[in-house]
Amino acid sequence: MSITHAHMTPEQAEAFGKELDAIRERVLADVGQRDADYIRKVIRAQRGLEVAGRGLMFAGFFPPAWVAGTAALSVSKILDNMEIGHNVMHGQYDWMKDPELTSKGFEWDSACPGDQWRHSHNYMHHTHTNILGKDRDIGYGVLRMSEDQRWHPYYLGNPLYATLLATFFQYGVALHDLEVEEITAGRATWGEKREMAQKIWQKVRRQTLKDYVLFPLLTGPSLPFTLAGNAVANLNRNLWSFMIIFCGHFPDGVEEFTEEETADETRGEWYYRQLLGSANLTGGKLFHIMSGNLSHQIEHHLFPDLPAHRYAEISVEVREICERYGLPYNAGPLHQQFGSVVKKICRLALPGRGGSDAAPAMEKPEVALAAAA
Amino acid sequence: MTATTTKRPFGVGLLDALAGPHGIDRYLEILRPVWSLGDARAQVTEVRRPTRDSVTLTLRPNRGWSGFTAGQFIRMGVEINGVRETRCYSPACSEGAHGVIEITVRRHPEGKVSGFLVDNARPGMHVELSEADGDFILPAERPAHVLLLSGGSGITPVMAMLRTLCEEGHRGSITFLHYSRGPADVAYKAELDELARRHPNVRVVHGHTREAGGDLAGHIDAGHLRAARVDPACTPAFACGPPSLIEAARQLWPDELLHTESFLPPSLTIIGDDATGSISFTGSGQRVENDGRTLLEQAERAELSPDFGCRMGICKTCTCRKTAGVVRNALTGQVSAAEDEDIQICVSVPVGDVALEL
């Protein structure tokens, strides 16, 4: 490991890894009815809200019905994508052997085909978390999110691109695995990507047909209101998921790694990178559910396949372990974490390693660690 | 495990488009678990406990289930502590039973599902069903005389055959020879007596292996057949029971007259010193040294959780693609070296290096 990060001897890293492995083993041995009941309860709530939202659109010309319907549909889409889809597709409920809840089979209410997301997210991002040049979630191929990404005049548009990505986030996620930048750079051809692009197109078409053709037509005289309500619900989901996801790895204090320093990583060191490369959001129980428990990003990255509703109780132990090993544990409320992400997006639009107005938290990680220790 | 019917009512396509990507069933089932247009499911409507360690369930399947032939089995999924466990059961009712399935489950000493059902089954519970499967069935042209032979919980498929033949008004003689430990262990005693009373061509013979009080004592042999007035040389037999009963029947009947189904898995675990090579699970990137056990057991040892049902080479739930290597079928001894072949991992033992898509 590079000395730019918090110091840990190989022996400490091994002991640290064993303690985390022990948590994992214990939770895996304990999964059962409680977890099954939980995820089914969330699914019932989501499906109920969706039906209510769709139903209220029939009275969409009546403003309170439109507002309530749009809100119900927004929450339904957020729950579907985050607490249900993201977590089920991680295999958190595979042990239930319920074909509707297996990581391989689940499909979500999003433009991104489940299969491609499982590759770009479960494998690429979770394996190579915060390794520059390998983790394509750093900037999603369009943004400059790290001082170590070389500046180019293109990045002057960083805040604009981020706004566009947030607005159309579900399409950004859908195109993510296509690696369009590989084609523009001449390292791949459209021919190689055709099959993948077709699958994305099919999914986008089905989603569009449902939200922007069938349901508006079905509601008859409410057609324009339904169209608007569905668009706003999709937008709400896009903005919310962008915000939560960007708070996972880009707030101040989150560290990045190079391919060299992670080349011969042990299991303990992998855990260590997941911890240093992730940040948590603090908040109430409802907030955690609405964030798909990605508010416990650290625990999610340590244990991506444990049922996410258990992260809150696991986090107590993880925090305690981090304190004992003198490791930072990055957590803060949404406004603070997202505020620092927005600042970073704007700051990195300019050349250099952040400019002269860099906040103290921009200093190299060992300083942040010294402050935490 | 869930069976999808090809014929769907008009309008379901539109409903599915509206309910996409989950499909209309994912909304209907929230109202009632058995409300599904595509998945075969059933509700338990009646629970009886005919003997000290068995339970008889009456199931009302939804329209997703399309019936069975007497002697076949279904895979039934039950949720236990949040985990859907799937096992094979043969319905004991007649083929023509109107809209219901009857199964009888006997507690297996280490059986998770059988123990759960015997202790906890209650009306109102719902279960997942598969389409019926299996070739242990009566020929379409019914044999003139027939012996239905069973041991223990193997009674269910032959009970379905007996009830079906009776309902059809079959005229030939039917001998129903059932072995159990003692009189208190016969699951269908009253029903059998009633059928024998109403149908003069049906003869029921009880063999008891451990206790007195039966028509025959001990395990099946030529003497039992003489006493039951069955001539194995000219009477086709349909036999279902533990491996020892099936093995004994094989000694008594010519091959062409004997149809069998075994209910307990034959002993497959052969941990040999001669086990060589390693197994690559290509889907998960795992690799383990071959210890000579079945691929299913070795996959489980590697903490993979492949689907399985019967664990005895019947139900094909565990079928997996083998991309390279040689395996031996532990039931038949048949060795197979074909590349890219679908194998049943519960009865396949690796011979040297094997690569599986798991």
Image (cartoon, coloured by chain):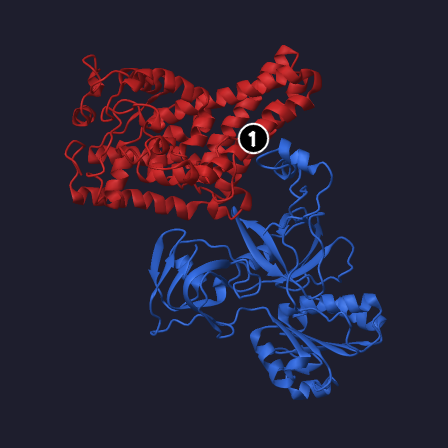
Chain colours: A red, B blue
In the figure, is residue A96 to the left or right of A141?
right
The residue at 19%/39% (across/down) is: A260
- Total labels: the figure holds 1
Q: Position of residue B124 (x, y in %)?
A: 67, 46
> B170 or B211: which is nearer to us?
B170
Is residue A49 at all visible to an observer of this figure? no
The residue at 45%/35% (across/down) is: A86
* B265 versus A287 height, above or below: below
In the figure, is residue A261 to the left or right of A195?
left
> B16 or B123: which is nearer to us?
B16
Q: For mark 1, what is the residue? A: A205
Q: Position of residue B25 (x, y in %)?
A: 64, 39
Is residue A3 at all visible to an observer of this figure? yes
Say which quarter of the image contains residue B117. bottom right
Q: Position of residue B34 (x, y in %)?
A: 67, 44
Which amino acid lies under the numbered mark 1 shown in the image of this protein? Arg
Q: Quadrant of the C terminus of chain A?
A: top left
